[in-house]
Image: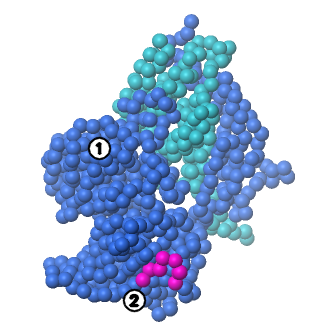
Amino acid sequence: MCTVPSTAVTNRVTESAFTEFARAAEPRLKIALCAAFGPEVGMDSTSYALAYGWEHWERIRSLPNPVGYLWGVGRNHARRLHKQRRSQLHLFESVSVEDTPWVEPGLPAALAGLTERQRTAVVLVKGMAWTLAEVADLMQVAVPTVQTHLERGMRRLRRDLGA
Amino acid sequence: MKADLDSQIRQFAMALERALSKVQLFEVQEAASDHGRAQQTPDGTHEPRIVSAQTSRRTIKGPLVAHAKVTASPFALKGVGIALAVAAVVLVVFGGLSLLTGGDGGAVNQPVTTASTAPTTSTTVPSTNPDGRFEAVPFTGETWQLAVTEEPNADGTYDVCFVANPVDGRTDSPTTSSPWCESRPNNDPRIVRDLLGMYPLLVTDTSYVMVIQLNDHPVDRITVTGDGVNETVTPFTFPRSGSQVAAVEVPQSDGTITVTAFNQGVVVDEQEAAGRIEPLVIDGTPIDDTTAATIGTLLGGKQMTDEDLERITGSVGLAHSGYLIESTTTADGTYELGLIVYQEEPIEPGVLPPVICFSEYATTQGVNVGGGAVCATSQERAQELADFGVDAGGACGPHPKEQPVVDGNWLTLAVWGIPDTTEFITVGLGDGTTVEVDVGNGVALHVWEGHADITSITFDGISQTQMELISSYLPIQGISDDCDASDGEG
């Protein structure tokens, strides 16, 4: 008879739970962090947050909002990266006129000029059709706060783009 | 002709989403290897893989065995004109729960010689003042002294207090610390009851004094070893209460030290203290004695000056911001937390400030609200608190030692008696947002933002894990030089 060591069983259970969580959380974390910090830093920060989540899974799994917590972890990592690479990093590259002819070429730069929270709210709500509540849940702020960031962000975009 | 702004953003985001969908950052390694077998860890589990961009410096510390290696060629993202070269770094994480809580924790049963550096001495010099208070200076270092007092209570019990003092004539001495007192009976089942290192009672340029509390079990020797420390001290016994305490000067370090209690050569208890926290550093500069003392005495009701807080925040004109400073675990196993709140408009004494402090904790955990500080944001909330016996007009619950201090824009207050089983408390801000503050993991300092624009705080000399936890609440420099300050980002 082959017996499986209890540690291995426990590991598999833990791993399975984390795998399920990570598969569900990764797309949302990735798109949100990339919206806020650009694809390069956003992806790096997503992987950082997931690695952090795995490392601290026993604690994080018990949190009421683990995705929101990992958003905070990824966000802070992204901020550090941006701070380090400030001089050589562009948030979003210019859009391709061929690929996206209906998009104002100045839009990426205008988005980059928003505050982090404004940009997150604008891209997720206006671009990704997230609800205010979904963004608020991720950012762990109140819905009216997201609304405020969204309105200010849109106002600033219109001003910068002359729209 | 361009589309309207909403449509443009949607198209831009869709292009971004398309590009990102091609990259999967997380996978469980179940694919067959070159030899057609699934790769497994030695215990039979698969290996979760988290693939990160080439710049990742993710390091998993602690007992988890982790390593990183470059395993893939650069690839590119397209769709929004983004050419992104990424080399995949695979973090291969072995192990599981047993490793998560592991560490060898080897016992130190051999006698340990007294260290040659910064010797800590133990003497017993009983003396009694006319008011019945016992005082002694049982522990001394080159530049510091740890004085103790024992004060009688009406019920026949005694409070024991500690005060760190400088050494006369030494210009490099730390300043006098705030007194730390406890009155809890000595009924803790642990022999080494507490390692008071979370908030250093006394800090020198390179070390801090770690106070080790003991219960009533006889202990005649304490060794502190590991991470370059090799100290032996004799516990001091308060003559009236019988409380035992030892103090040892240890270097500032992030490593783990082992505290072992001996009685007649037999190990009676052993505990580890990891991630010893160094003094708070702001803007790369250690805070000066005044600020340190101010922070240290927050729980004693002393307020910080505007200048202190201005330097800490690096900014004025905030909507409001809060600092939550965690004291160490107290003798009865509870936490004490200090809080500083700034609001743009001066706070009028007796008028509710724009924060709720620990209210959820106080009302949901069944803790005596009167023992903590509670604030309210509305008259309804104030009435609710009043129903609990809290002076809502004064905004904060009473404590024998503690009353909120309102000075202009600043409010300082404290909450006491948070059980050590509490991991999070909910702090509500005036705009209805809430922040969960982790209080149960040994993090010494939390900072949170309301609508605050706090842009220049850095913390040095703490462990990576602690930094990450703190960072979860720490607003740091934003990514744009042209941020709208009113939005709370740098």
Q: Which amino acid does label 1 sit on?
A: Tyr
Determine which of the numbered discs, if any, sits on residue B402 in the image.
none
Residue found at x 59% / y 69%: B103
| Residue situated in front as seen by the camera: B315 or B429 | B315
Q: Is residue A141 above or below residue B198?
A: above
Q: Which residue lies furthest to the bottom in this view?
A: B264
| Sequence-first disc among 2 and 1 | 2
x and y, in percent, of residue B243 in the image = 32, 82
For the residue carrying disc 2, how many other residues have a C-alpha within 10 Å: few (<14), some (14-19), or many (20+)?
Answer: some
Q: What residue type is labelled 2?
A: Pro
For the residue carrying disc 1, how many other residues have a C-alpha within 10 Å: few (<14), some (14-19), or many (20+)?
Answer: many
Instruction: Please give the range of residues in magenta.
Output: B114-121
Residue found at x 45% / y 90%: B263
Kindly tell me whether residue B356 is visible in this rendering.
no
x and y, in percent, of residue B27 in the image = 67, 45
Q: Is residue B370 magenta?
A: no
x and y, in percent, of residue B21 in the image = 64, 32
Label 1: element kind: strand
The blue one among the chains is B
Quarter placement of the C terminus of chain B: top left
The cyan one among the chains is A
Label 2: element kind: loop
Chain letter for the residue marked with disc 1 in the picture: B
| Residue situated in front as seen by the camera: B215 or B113 | B113
Determine which of the numbered discs, if any, sits on residue B218 in the image.
2
Q: Please name the colour scheme applied to the rendered image.
A: by chain
The residue where tag 1 is placed is B342
x and y, in percent, of residue A78 in the image = 55, 40
Q: In which quarter of the image is residue B151?
A: bottom left
Chain letter for the residue marked with disc 2 in the picture: B
